[in-house]
Image (cartoon, rainbow, N blue to C red):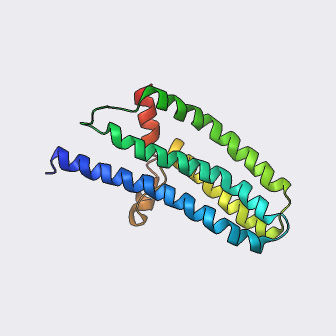
Amino acid sequence: MIDRAGGKAQLRRTYLSLGVGELAAVAVFVVVQPMVANRLGDGGGRALWWAMTPLLVILLQGSAYWLAARSWLPGAKRTGMPRGLALVYRALRLLNPLLLAACLAGMLLTGPRAGALVLCLLVWTFGVLEYVNYFVTRLSYPVARWFALVGRWRTPALVRDVARAL
């Protein structure tokens, strides 16, 4: 049996890993974007920024959530997500789809060539999947168990924390 302190410490490490991992993903995307954009040509670089913007914003929201959640684990000084932060994430749940739609329009209006458009749509879709994973239903599971678990339609931790705080 795992003692509570050991379980809490492991959960804090997991949340730290998730938060730092999302930040690292943002850094990698930002560094790689100019290299990829140079190969896309006419409007492709701008279209890629349009496609990446919601992905980066949602990854930053996820990172902030995981890093902040370390402070309200069971047994911490604060229990539960602060109400003000819950209100922010509730608003983000509504604003992110607007950002996704606006960036999709911006991406399409830049008129990238077919190859660039396919890449941009894939990146934009990744942003949609991140939104779903954080705000609608959990999609991220270990690869070996993904098919068994994704069909359970679990509520994301962020959504549960927001609901408990409000």
Which residue occupies 39% across, 62% down? 145
Residue 63 horizontal side relative to residue 125, left or right: left
Residue 165 screen position, x and y as percent: 41, 28
Which residue occupies 74% across, 49% down? 103
Residue 13 horizontal side relative to residue 23, left or right: left
On the question of residue 136 being in view, the answer is no
Q: Nearer the viewer, residue 34 or 58?
A: 34
Determine the image quadrant of residue 47. bottom right
Which residue occupies 66% across, 41% down? 97
Picture mark count: 0
On the question of residue 7 being in view, the answer is yes
The quadrant the C terminus occupies is top left
Which residue occupies 78% across, 55% down? 107
Q: Nearer the viewer, residue 89 or 101?
A: 89
Vertical comparison of 121 with 90: above or below: below
Residue 3 screen position, x and y as percent: 15, 47
